[in-house]
Amino acid sequence: MKDLLSDKEVSTVISLLEEIYPFANCELNHRSPFQLLIAVVLSAQTTDIRVNEVTEELFRQYPDLDAMLELDEERLSVIIRKIGMYRTKSKNVMALCRKLKNDFGGNIPETFAELVTLPGVGRKTANVVLSNAFGQQAIAVDTHVFRVSNRIGIVSGSDPLKTELALMQRLPKEKWTAMHHMLIWHGRRQCFARNPQCASCGINDFCMMFRKAAVK
């Protein structure tokens, strides 16, 4: 049995996911590109739900760059201590804020190359900011996108970078951002890491993992 869906099947999967998740979007609460950037940095190895809990207080007191620069690492650590790696994230956030002020005039960079120069910002964070804050088509590969896209058989990538590059080849560019969100929503609501709900899945007819399980 082949390991990847055909282009026609991928197109069908996109259409089905659009029907299932018509309102899929970023679930990190934010009111500005700056807040989104900080929230995504904080979200590494942490659920969006937990991040939203800490940013509710953080952004209420320190809603923008100038306000955030009034903090120090110790105080920030106290505010975000509920999330994983909070000390490292506190250090990165404060260094990021200083770099934004000193190198970018307080503005959030709008290019991938500039964003990844910021402390704590990798490919996933940069792509999330570009797509959600600036409307650029991008695919951010988190644990859900990696798991779901490979399970379905849209791609066969051994790591997030290979998966990202493969998705960029297999998906229409105008669907990159939408598919990022829909794959995340599907991973959080249906295609769980453990005990995925395959029987009730709306795309199981086009899922390679489900097909393989059916022939065993």
Image (tube, rainbow, N blue to C red):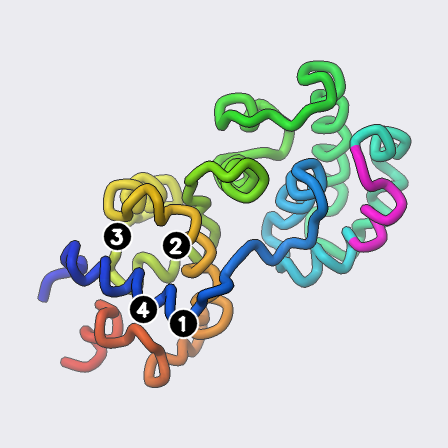
User: What span is in magenta?
Assistant: 56-64
- Quadrant for the C terminus in the image: bottom left
Distance from Cα at disc 4 to Cα at disc 3? 17 Å
> Which mark is nearer the camera, 1 or 3?
1
Image marks 1 and 4: residues in contact by CB distance under 8 Å: yes
Which residue in the rendered view is the most extreme toward the left? 1
Q: Residue at x 81, y 46 (%)?
A: 59
Q: Earlier in the sequence, mark 4 or mark 3?
A: 4
- The circle drawn on residue 155 is 3
In-image side of 111 versus 119 (left or right): left
Q: Nearer the viewer, mark 4 or mark 3?
A: 4
**Residue underneath mark 1:** 20
Q: CA distance from mark 1 to mark 2?
A: 12 Å
Badge 3 crowding class, 10 Å Cα cut-off, few under 14, some 14 to 19, many 20 or more, is many
Q: Nearer the viewer, mark 3 or mark 2?
A: 2
In the picture, the disc for residue 107 is none
Q: CA distance from mark 4 to mark 2?
A: 11 Å
